[in-house]
């Protein structure tokens, strides 16, 4: 079976992807820039500044780096206001039970997220001390589709990539996993992505996948 499982956070462990959308939408409205859910899907898994550049593709204006920094800060303030309202209620029973079972059958569990807010989110939903390793956007130079975040997570678990499974809702995340030598399971948007070895409709299907692997 897989010895380690590395989970993306936003859109996999909890639905903060919806909050990212709301916060970017508020910034885009403020700047008078068109933004919709389809554009939002392109932001999954990639860093805050790279996300901003994608949003600004729809702007007629050219902004300085200092202005862009302010916009990213503004978005993060909206986002943090939404995160503040999160509590353990925002961790679904399905996800929590599955994590517990995976741990019980001997898997090491890690988070590999591009977000600089990952540790705060884990605290809010009651998983502050849960994972064997947490690697987030503060520790990496290159965000997904670069494999850095997952490679570092596997290293912290003391495992090689071929023995770990990555769980992702973003195409960029699946690409990162494959480039790093990991098998990947796709959830949500990434479920239909051809590079995902497994397609998850429900989170608890992970237990079967993990135990079936030779
Ligand atoms: C995750 C999300 C992205 C987000 C990135 C950075 O990967 O899927 O949509 O842009 O984290 O998040 P942050 O919390 O650092 O702004
Ligand atoms: Mg995600």
Image (cartoon, rainbow, N blue to C red):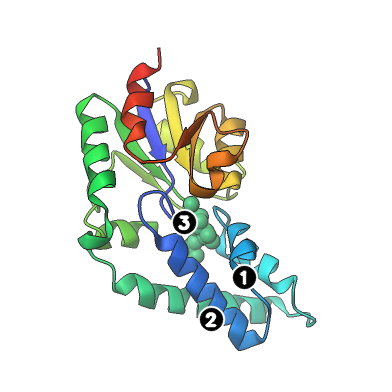
Q: Which quarter of the figure has residue 16?
A: bottom left
- Location of mark 2 (residue): 26
Q: Are marks 3 and 2 in contact (CB under 8 Å)?
A: no
- Which residue is nearer to you in this view: 88 or 68? 88
* Figure check: 50 above or below 34: above
Q: Is residue 36 left or right of residue 103?
A: right
Residue positioned 29% across, 38% down in the render:
132
Graded by Cα atoms within 10 Å as few (under 14), some (14 to 19) or many (20 or more), the crowding at tag 1 reads few
- Location of mark 3 (residue): 138
Q: Which quarter of the figure has residue 65?
A: bottom right
Question: Mark 3 vs mark 1: which is more N-terminal?
Answer: 1
The nearer-to-camera label among 3 and 2 is 2
Question: Mark 3 vs mark 2: which is more N-terminal?
Answer: 2
- Which residue is nearer to you in this view: 86 or 63? 86
Residue positioned 52% across, 80% down in the render:
74
Graded by Cα atoms within 10 Å as few (under 14), some (14 to 19) or many (20 or more), the crowding at tag 2 reads some
Classify mark 3 as within 8 Å of ligand 1 or not, answering yes or no. Answer: no
């Amino acid at each position: 079976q897989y010895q380690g499982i590395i989970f993306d956070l936003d859109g996999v462990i909890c639905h903060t992807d919806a909050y990212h959308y709301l916060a970017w939408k508020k910034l885009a409205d403020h700047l008078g820039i068109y933004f919709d859910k389809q554009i939002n899907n392109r932001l999954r898994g990639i860093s805050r500044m790279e996300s901003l550049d994608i949003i600004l593709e729809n702007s007629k204006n050219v902004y300085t780096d200092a202005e862009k920094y302010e916009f990213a800060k503004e978005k993060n303030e909206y986002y943090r206001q939404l995160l503040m309202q999160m509590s353990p209620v925002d961790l679904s029973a399905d996800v929590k039970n599955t994590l517990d079972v995976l741990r019980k059958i001997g898997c090491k569990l890690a988070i590999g997220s591009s977000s600089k807010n990952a540790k705060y989110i884990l605290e809010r939903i009651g998983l502050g001390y849960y994972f064997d390793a947490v690697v987030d956007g503060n520790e990496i130079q290159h965000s997904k589709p670069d494999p850095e975040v997952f490679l570092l997570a596997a290293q912290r678990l003391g495992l090689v990539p071929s023995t770990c499974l990555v769980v992702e809702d973003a195409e960029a995340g699946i690409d990162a996993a494959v480039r790093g030598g990991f098998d990947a399971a796709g959830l949500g948007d990434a479920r239909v992505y051809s590079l995902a070895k497994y397609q998850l409709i429900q989170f608890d299907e992970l237990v079967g996948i993990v135990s079936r692997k030779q």
